[in-house]
Amino acid sequence: MQKVPSDNRAWLWGRDLHHVLVRSFAGIYPGELAQVPGGYGSSIPGATRLMSWRAWLVYLGLIGLGLMAIALAIQGSWFLAAGGISTAIILGVVLALRAARVEQRNALAEQVKALEKVEKQIAGIEKEGALQREVLEGKLWGLPIPLPAMNQGKRAGYLSAVVIVKDEGPYLQEWLEFHRLVGVQHVYLYDNGSFDGTEQLLSDFIRSGYVTRIPWSSFVRDGSPQKLAYAHALSNFGLAWRWMTLIDADEFLFPTESDNLPSVLTRFEHLPALAVYWRTFGFSGHEKRPSGLVIENFTMRAPFPPEPGVKRYLLKFKSIVDPSKVSAVVSPHMVKLENGLIGACTENGILVPSDDEHRERVSNGHLRINHYYTKSKEELEQKLSRGSGAGIPLSKKRSIAAKRAALVEMDLIEDKSIQRFLPKLRRRIVLYPAGEQFDGTTPEARTSLTESGTH
């Protein structure tokens, strides 16, 4: 090991002592800073701190006091020299301790700053992640949900309906009995977290085998429990049916001339999916929910086909599909077919997407959907408060609802065509009131049993 000359060692000790003092005084006065000249702290970590002019004054004063003590010692004033040296040592120790405490506080402050910096970085990452998640969810909302391939074997049933509901209890009996009346053989009802006793109300329909209730509270954040429900129904129950209709609880599907839907659908078995257009009904003068049936109380609707300027909100359809021909669910209104095309066919065989606005393509001579979008003003507000099964944000849903309601109310015509089913529907509701089990008999047979006193 190379030896350092004695004169160099003395210089190094002096330099290190100087650095210690610099480090001490630098911590005492953190304000009014002046940069320590270059070269300091090369052998002592942390010695390159900033010093204030007051620290330099104290430091130079100590050096002067030490030199004075040495001079007094040379002159023989040992008592004064010892006092000066003791004072310098005590003052140096006090200053060093205080510097150490301040340095510890500064180190803690640096750690806090470092933690704050890390927290800001984490917050930035979380914010960026939230934005990316929002973008991803938006993309997921618009993406089709693919379905597994299905065998085109023999189907046990002809027509079933798929519907998703949330707190629709007051309307379910009418809706279910109406669609049973027009030939829907089974309903797959997806319950999106109802709290209004829907499950109890459905108990008799379930026991009779007419309804399959699937609990369907929202479980992913892609924003479309309705689309997922349709995909689930097609994938799990589609093989049993020749046709499945994908509709809402405020939509009433019916034939315009025939007494039942199957007799009409047999004419369109060459089509993979059938588009049935809305007739959109408004408030019909009702501020609050009236007593009686929906199809009885709401009779005023917008003209059809809609005029230019309102087609975006009113020219919509729902689909009746052959489950074996569907490869994906694109939206609550349309599907992707096995040939890759998206949409459904009009009654004259033209394939149209849901957002098609060509009035000349619309054809609904045999099938219709009455869309009771608003019902009364009170019921519209209740409907909006339940949220959207399609995953639309509430603010956007309110905006769409206000626009659609205004467009419907702008020009109204009276339409009571669905009321030809009223007499039989009333009899069904009287014969099978909520809470009474439906035993599978027809209204006529039930009436005969009642009149004979055997039931």
Image (tube, helix red, strand yellow):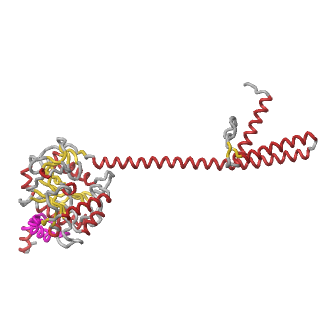
Residue drawn where x is 79% and y is 32% of the image: 10
Name the image quarter holding residue 190: bottom left
Stretch of the chain drawn in magenta: 415-444
Rendering coords of residue 223 (x, y %)? 31, 53
Q: Report which quarter residue 380 is drawn in.
A: bottom left
Query: Which residue lies most toward the top here?
Result: 2
Would you place residue 121 above or below residue 292 in this image? above
Q: Is residue 246 left or right of residue 142?
A: left
For the point 75% across and 33% down, which residue is it?
12
Question: Image quadrant for the C terminus?
Answer: bottom left
Q: Residue furthest right?
A: 76
Is residue 67 in view from this perspective?
yes
Q: Position of residue 122 (x, y in %)?
A: 48, 48
Q: Could you tell me if residue 188 is visible in this image?
A: no
Q: Quadrant of residue 283?
A: bottom left
* The N terminus sits in image quarter: top right
Residue 108 placement, left or right of 376: right
Q: Please say whether residue 438 is one of the residues in the magenta stretch.
A: yes
